[in-house]
Image: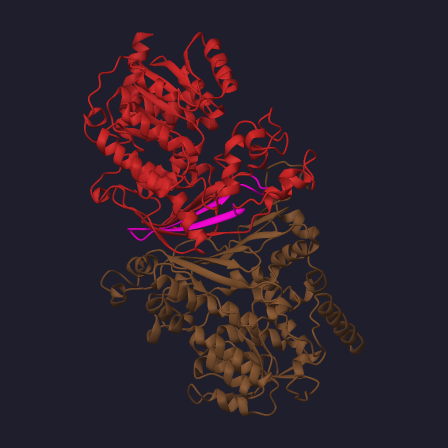
Chain colours: A red, B brown
Amino acid sequence: MKTNQNRRNFLKLASLASIGSLISPSSIYAYSQSLSKKIRIGLIAVGFRGQSHLNELLKRDDVEIVAIADPDKKMLALAQKILTKNNKPNVKEYSNGDYDYRNLLKNEKIDAVIVSSPWEWHKEHGIDAMRSGKIVGMEVSGAMNLSDCWDFVKTYKETKVPIMILENVCYRRDVMAVLNMVRKGMFGELIHAQGGYEHDLRGVLFNDGETAYNSGVEFGEKGFSEAKWRTNHYVNRNGELYPTHGLGPLAIMLDVNRGNRLVRLSSFASKSKGLNKYIVEHSKGGENHPNAKINFKQGDVVTTQIQCANGETILLTHDTSLQRPYNLGFRIQGTTGLWQDFGWGEANQGFIYFEKLMNKSHKWDNTEKWLKENDHPLWKSYEKEAENSGHGGMDYFVINTFIECIKNNISFPLDIYDLATWYSITPLSEISIENNGAVQEIPDFTNGEWKTRKSVF
Amino acid sequence: MKTNQNRRNFLKLASLASIGSLISPSSIYAYSQSLSKKIRIGLIAVGFRGQSHLNELLKRDDVEIVAIADPDKKMLALAQKILTKNNKPNVKEYSNGDYDYRNLLKNEKIDAVIVSSPWEWHKEHGIDAMRSGKIVGMEVSGAMNLSDCWDFVKTYKETKVPIMILENVCYRRDVMAVLNMVRKGMFGELIHAQGGYEHDLRGVLFNDGETAYNSGVEFGEKGFSEAKWRTNHYVNRNGELYPTHGLGPLAIMLDVNRGNRLVRLSSFASKSKGLNKYIVEHSKGGENHPNAKINFKQGDVVTTQIQCANGETILLTHDTSLQRPYNLGFRIQGTTGLWQDFGWGEANQGFIYFEKLMNKSHKWDNTEKWLKENDHPLWKSYEKEAENSGHGGMDYFVINTFIECIKNNISFPLDIYDLATWYSITPLSEISIENNGAVQEIPDFTNGEWKTRKSVF
């Protein structure tokens, strides 16, 4: 077992090195904290996403769950149930209202926290954690305000506490195979990229207050799980609310913040019809249901054009209020290759074209053969470990990277600048839409360092 | 034969009526010109596109080709060859330089002209024709300047001479089937639409000066056919150069200028790499070829976001300088249906989803069954006639509509306002790109009439 474990660690280290995560051996612990052998984790927010991370962490023998914090007793009970099932009963709880997480952050036994809270809490949870000297794994979202992004960066500069944005789609098998092909040069020079979040969330945004999915038309106080908070963003905001699943993988391929940067954007929003229609037509809703009177500000389809410093363009689409099959709509287009995604990550759900390798056929090839031939080394090595993990294995990789970087003193491949840049798309898109699509400059959160920072993913 | 002919005319008239082209019985001839039984046509410009129209017209017994004009002797000879082959030798030629077409326009035997000239000539050819009282069929392009669009509209208002924009993709079989489904309400309320011109034109933009396609790296004076003029636009401009194939079908479905209108746009352009790479890597090119030094201004991928007055958004993509399979990339998204095109118009090359009809499967269906079941009545009736026509039959329909509208005194379904609106996208996108994506207002060329004009396509 020990030998196996050592071998496993070695392999992990080798593959981390193979993805080039090494910047400087001391970088992640520049704030000099001594760590126990096991990485001691606190979870801030244990809703369904936090519980999913909990399940992932409990599979590992190099992690100890020290404490969990959530104001929601129901969710805490579900998390404790998972812990008990895994023979870890009586984990310390912080449940005394919205700010008891600050007491978790004072817990000296904790090395790192994973934040899976509602979007509007990310800034406080993340910044407070950094100020407490806890390494942060931060779930994805977009910022509430542009200044939040700067606050993240400033806090990082002051504290030097590392933070990783836990963008799992960067680890999707097809995405990593395409990244592999991009790095091999098969796409030539990259020119244009597309991605987005095209996912029918109506059954998530509304429920009956008891069952999370497809169970009703309530939200906010009367809703359960995501419907409790996420839907309010659709009432009060209009923008690219959830940019990172689409943008993250593209930013990696385009070396954003590492030789390239996002310069400016313009966003357009369609009218808002999908959510109202869902409420009106639902068996538990109807024209006379109070929620049928609500004016959802969020446009059903929001598109965002982005210009990169190196001349590439990116197009993001946020499309979550209408009936549709799931499809993040990736497109990677270079001078010698073109990939278009059309599903939920299965190898055969895309189109691909390489003129030279396909004898100028001018015909799409199915992606399956290409993605399998160019499977990323990480996926080849960890297929088995990833197999039973969330979201088709992506969740294994994102958590594994977080833990292994901490253990091995390696900088996170998705760091504070990626977090700030990706998060900034949301408030900038909102300002753009409010001003009829007016172009917004995207700040350089690296303060010029993007020119010399090396690609590490 | 006569009975067949009458029956055929009746069918044509019936189907024109069925697509609702009737605005006012007198509208098309408001400028009161008497017409002979056969529609007497003059062709302005008989390059390959003009010759394709010529072939189409020569199949008809209700049309007489009276004259052709082109400064290019080679193209004139090719056109005469087609005419001779069809037992129409010695058609009057106007070949004395760039402006001899004006003498064709003085020819009293001509009822209507079809203009298939290089883009930069459309304005002069179209406006001069209207001023001469000749009905105009105008090939597609984008305007050189926004003022050109206004000049078209002003000339129409002064002369009342009808002009039709010959946008053939509006008649593509899959596009018309989807239009049919949209009109039946299968997509619900439309929310978002995409289209574009995604077609690898490198082998068209460059040739050896003798053979039109894939034969070399010359253009301009040393090029042949489209390479003679089209490529210069890529040297000097950066914009949505060719908007109508993508926009036309979407504009019909969205009732643009007929209850709806395009309000504003923002365009982003990627860097320009494809054309230079093509020249450098071509066996007749190379790094030292003089054209390898040329700085092509046109970005390889140009995206344009458009907002509609009724709240829908449109996304156009111009992508013609890179290796890729042909795909206009249509997407029609409504509250109850979603179509995405992935080929060149074959029935089985797309994805479609109707939640209610597909039992909330959340899975794409192949389009074939749906497009066949909802084949447009026009295609059902004229499949045979269209069979051997250009571009998969589209060219039959666009020319047939042009001629039948004239014969039957029916307003064109694609008219002066469609022309001006669609053409305006090009200069507005150029201004937007020059100004880093700054939003441009799209003029209301109908001067408010869009609110009351009825859908006629």
- Which span is picked out in magenta? A298-325
Left or right position of A350 against B363:
left
Left or right position of B51 against B182:
left
Left or right position of B454 against A435:
right
Residue A65 x/y as whole percent: 38, 14
Q: Is residue A197 magenta?
A: no
Q: Quadrant of residue B265?
A: bottom left
Question: Which residue is found at the position 53% from the left and 63% from the top?
Answer: B262
The count of marks equals 0
Quarter of the picture holding the C terminus of chain A: top left
Q: Is residue A258 visible?
A: yes
Residue B426 x/y as whole percent: 44, 67
Q: Is residue B200 visible?
A: no
Q: Is residue A306 magenta?
A: yes
Q: Quadrant of residue B236?
A: bottom left
Q: Is B305 drawn above or below residue A275 in the view shown?
A: below
Q: Is B309 drawn above or below residue A206 in the view shown?
A: below
Q: Nearer the viewer, residue A233 or B329?
A: A233
Question: Which residue is found at the position 23% from the left and 34% from the top?
Answer: A157
Q: Nearer the viewer, residue B373 or A212?
A: A212
Residue B123 x/y as whole percent: 47, 79
Residue farthest toward the right in the current orientation of the protein = B3
Q: Nearer the viewer, residue A426 or B225?
A: A426
Residue A219 x/y as whole percent: 57, 33
Q: Nearer the viewer, residue B277 or B451?
A: B451
Q: Quadrant of residue B251?
A: bottom right
Quarter of the picture holding the N terminus of chain A: top left
